[in-house]
Amino acid sequence: MAQLFVVHPQNPQVRSLKQAGEFLAKGGLVAVPTDSSYALVARLDDKTAADSLRRLRGLDERHHLTLLCRDLAEIGHFARVDNRQYRFLKLATPGPWTFILEASREVPRRVSHPSRKTIGIRVPNHVVALGLIEQAGSPLISTTLIPEDEDEPLNDAQEILDRYANQLAAVIDGGSCPLMPTTVIDLTGPEPEIVRRGQGDLSALGLD
C-alpha cells in the first residue's frame, strides 16, 4: 500500500520528503507534483524501478524518459553540453522546459534513447520536486503520470493513490499542478528545434 505524504506546496516538510526519498532508495516508485503535472519518478541507478516505471505507463524503450535535475551544473554532468547549449540552458532553467541532449556516459544506456543516445532533461520550477531530488541525492528518472491508454495526466493525489496504491511506494500530495505539459526543445542540432509546444514563453528564449 502506497504511503501518502501531504506537504505544503511552497514550504514542504523536509521530514516527509526524506521519507519519500528513502522509498526511492529501496527501489520504489513515487508520484510527485511538478510545474507541469504529477510525475512518476525513480532513482536513476535502479534498473528494476526504471522497468517498473515503463510498465506502469505502458512505454517502450523508444520513449524518452526525462531526467529531473537540481540545477544547471547537474545537467552538465549527465548530458554533453557545449557553450552554445549552456548559454541557452542558463536562460531557460529552472522552468517548464524539457531539453533533448546527448547523454553522457553517466546515464545508463537503458534510460537514453536506444538509437540516438539522447536524453530528455530538465530542472523543474517546483519546490516539492526539487526537494525530493535533493533528498534522493541524485537526479531522478521521470515520466508524466498519464494512465495507460488515456490522454490526460492525473492531477489529484488521492486519485493517484486510489488507482496505484499497490504499484507505487509513495504519493506526495503538494496540491494540484498545471495540466499543460512542458515544451520540449531538441538541442542536439545546429539550432534549437521545438518538438512539442506546451508551457513557457518561447519568445523569452528567442524562439518565437
Image (cartoon, rainbow, N blue to C red):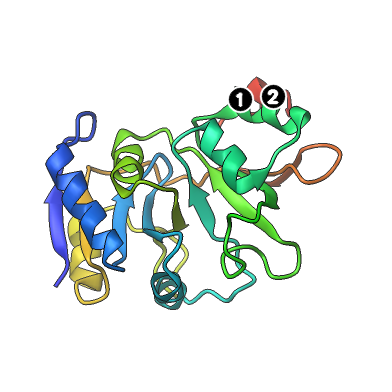
Residue 170 spot, x, y in % from top left = 21, 61
User: Whole-Å distance between the Cαs marked 1 and 2?
Assistant: 5 Å
Seen in the picture, residue 193 relative to 117 is either above or below; the reply is: above
Find disc 1 in the rendering and name its residue.
Answer: 90
- How busy is the neighbourhood of tag 2: few (under 14 within 10 Å), some, or many (20 plus)? few
Image-based side of 35 in relation to 198, left or right: left
Residue for point 77% across, 28% down: 84
Residue 149 visible to an observer of this rendering: no
The quarter of the picture where the C terminus appears is top right
Disc 2 marks which amino acid? Arg
Find disc 2 in the rendering and name its residue.
Answer: 87
Image-based side of 173 in relation to 155, left or right: left
Image-based side of 65 in relation to 62, left or right: left
Seen in the picture, residue 202 relative to 197 is either above or below; the reply is: above
Image-based side of 21 in relation to 99, left or right: left
Residue 120 spot, x, y in % from top left = 60, 52
Q: Please identify the residue farthest to the front as the structure is shown.
A: 105
Circle 1/circle 2 CB separation < 8 Å: yes
Residue 78 spot, x, y in % from top left = 59, 47
Seen in the picture, residue 58 relative to 27 is either above or below; the reply is: below
Q: Secondary structure at mark 1?
A: helix
Seen in the picture, residue 159 relative to 51 is either above or below; the reply is: above
Residue for point 19% across, 65% down: 161
Q: Secondary structure at mark 2?
A: helix
Disc 1 marks which amino acid? Lys
Residue 55 spot, x, y in % from top left = 44, 78
Residue 36 visible to an observer of this rendering: yes
Decide which of 103, 151 is in the foreground and name it: 103
Decide which of 151, 60 is in the foreground and name it: 60
* Residue 87 in which image quadrant: top right
